[in-house]
Amino acid sequence: MFFKKYLNLIIVTFLALGFFAATASFNYFSQENDYVKWTSPDETANYFFTKNFAMTGELAVMEKANLLGNNLVVPRSVRSDQGFIKPVSFLGISLIYGTIAALTDISVIPYLTPFFAALGIIVFYLTIRRIFSDRVGLWSAFMLAVFPAYTYYTVRSMFHNVLFIVMLLFGLYFFLLSLAERREKIYCRFLTWKLPVRTWLEFLAAALSGIFIGLTVITRTSEILWLLPSLLIIWVFYARRYGLVKTLIFIAGLALPLLWVAYYNQILYGSFWYGGYNEMNKSLEDIAKSGGAILQFGLGMDSLAYYRDYFLTIAKNIFYFGFNPGLSKSMFINYVVKMFPVLFYAGLAGLLFLIVQNCRRFKKKHLVYVLVWLLFSTFLIVYYGSWRFNDNPDVTRFTIGNSYTRYWLPFYLGLMPLASLALIRVSRALLLMSSKTVSRVRRWAATGLQAMATAVFAAISILFVLFGSEEGLMYLYYNNLAERDNTRLIWSLTEPSGIIITRYYDKFFWPERRIIMGALPDDGILRAVQQLVNYYPVYYYNFYLKPVDVDYLNNSKFTPYYLRMSEVKKVNPKFGLYKLELATSTPATSTSMLKK
C-alpha cells in the first residue's frame, strides 16, 4: 500500500539521482584537484569568491598590484576598489555555496548545483502535483530532468540561474504547504499558545517559504522586477486563507537572507542597498532622487510633469537593456519556438485544454497559475529579448550557450505542466474505447503512450544538449580538455607572481596568474605596465604576431613608455606568448609599493 501510494515520488527520486550522477560527472571528468576551471568569466569569478568565502569568511581580496596598475589588474566579472578585488555579480551563490563548503569541504563546490538541481526535480514534482495532479507532476518532472537548458546550466554549475530556480521552487512549495486544509486537530502547546499541530506546521512552512524566497532574491536580485509582482498576485488571491500571522511569519523569514546580503553589501560597497553592478547602483540612485523630488509636489497641474518624469525614470532604469518589442519577438522565435518546438506547441495545447477545463469547472489555483506565468513570461521575454547577448563569438548563431536560455528558464518551466497536461489529455482521447473495454487496460495503455512520448522528448533533448550545436556538452568537454593543456603550458612559461595581458583567456589563467584585460597597444594598459614591470613579470598572450609586427610595436607604440616586447613562445598556430620589459631606465616609481 505504501509503495503504491508513493510510487510516483519514488520514481522521481530515482530520476533525480540519475540526473545528479549524469550532470556531476561532467565536472568530475573535466576537472582535477589542481585544475578547476570554467568556460565563462562569470563562473570563474563566482567560484573564486565562493572558495575564498569558504576558506576565510570574506569576499574581498587585496591585490597589491592594483595599487600600481590603476585598478586594471582584474579579470572580467571582477572589480577593483583601491586594490581590493570584489564580486561584480550577485552575492547569493557565493554566500550559500561558500557556507556549505565551509561546513564540508571546498571540493564539493562544483557539485552543489547538480545537487540542488536534482532536489529541484523532486520539488518541482511535489509543487506541480498540488496545483494540477500527480500524473501532471510526474511527466513535468521527467521533462525538467531532460530539458536541455536546465541540464546545460546545471553542468555549468557556477551560474546563478539553476540555483535561483530551485530556491524559488522550494519557496513556492512551502507556500502551498502553508495553505494546506486543516483536518484532524491534534493540539500542541508552545509557551502560552495552544494550537493544533497542523497550524504549527503551517507556520513553519510559511517561515521556510519566506527564507527560500529570500534566498531566491539574493541569488539573482535583478529578478525581483517580476518576482515581486508575481508574489503579490498570489498573495492577493490567497490573502484571506493565508492570514495575517502567516504573512508576518513569511516576511520575517524573507528578511533573514536579505539582511545577510545587506551586511556584506555594506562591507563591500558601502551601502546596504548597493551591489557589484555599478549600472544597477546608478539606477537605484536615479529612482531615489526622482522619488525624493516628487514628494515636494501635490496633485496640481504643475506636479503632473514631475509624476510623468518620475515614471519615465523608473521605466528607463528598469529597461536598462532598452525596449525593443521587434527584437524580443525575434529572440522568442529563435530561442523558444525554433529551439524547443515540442515544448512550446505542447504547452500551448495544454493552455487551451486548461482554459476549456476551467470553463466547465473553475479552479482558482489554475487561474492564479496562468496569470502569474503570463505576467513573468511576458516581462522576461520583453526585458531580456530587447537586448542582444553575444555569448557565442559567432553573433549569427542561436545556440544554447547564449544567455537567453538561462534567463528564460522560469518561462520554460512554466510550459512543462501545460505540456504534460496536453500529453495526458491527448493520450486519453486516443484511447476512448467502447464501454466493453476494461478501464484499467485503458489507463495502462494511456500511461504507455505518455511514457513513449516522454521518452521521445527525452531522446531529442539529450541529443540536443550533447551535440545540438558547437556549444553542446560533448564539444564543451573536449574543448575544456584542450584548454587545460594550453593553460598548463602557459603556467609553465610564466612565474606565479606574473601578470598576463589577455583579451580572452582570463577565465583559464586567473587566479593562478594576475590578469589585465585588453589587447596591445592600449595607452591605459601601457601606462599601468610601465609601473608594474618594476615589480612583476608582465606577459602578453594574444593572437600570434610576426617578428615585423613586434618590431613595429617596439619602435613606435612602446617607445614613449620605455617598454620592449619579446617573443617567449608560439603556443599554437593562432596564439603567442610575449614578455614586456623596460627598454631603458624609467621615471622613478613609488618605493612604498611593495612587490607581493
Image (cartoon, rainbow, N blue to C red):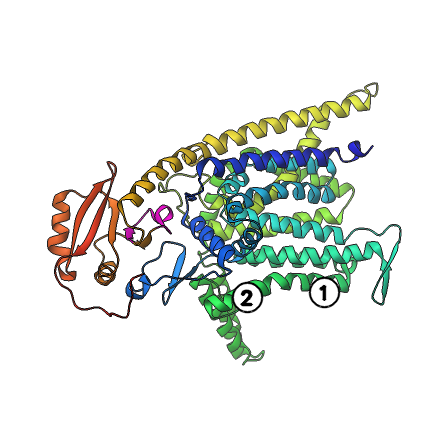
Q: Where is residue 331 in the image (x, y as percent from the top left)?
A: 46, 44
Report the span colored magenta.
Answer: 498-512
Quarter assignment of residue 431: top right
Badge 1 marks a residue whose secondary structure is: helix
Q: Given the image, on which type of amino acid does mark 2 rest?
A: Ala
Badge 2 marks a residue whose secondary structure is: helix
Q: Where is residue 383 in the image (x, y as percent from the top left)?
A: 50, 53
Q: Is residue 71 visible?
A: no
**Can you say whether 4 is above or below 166 in the image?**
above
**Can you say whether 571 is above or below 560 in the image?**
above
Quarter assignment of residue 354: top right
Contact? badges 2 and 1 (CB < 8 Å): no
Numbered circle sitting on residue 262: 2
Q: Given the image, on which type of amino acid does mark 1 rest?
A: Leu
Residue shown at 75%/54% (left/top)?
A: 178
Residue shown at 67%/44% (left/top)?
A: 123
**Can you say whether 533 is above or below 358 in the image?**
below
Q: Going by the picture, which residue comes out furthest to the top?
A: 436
Numbered circle sitting on residue 248: 1
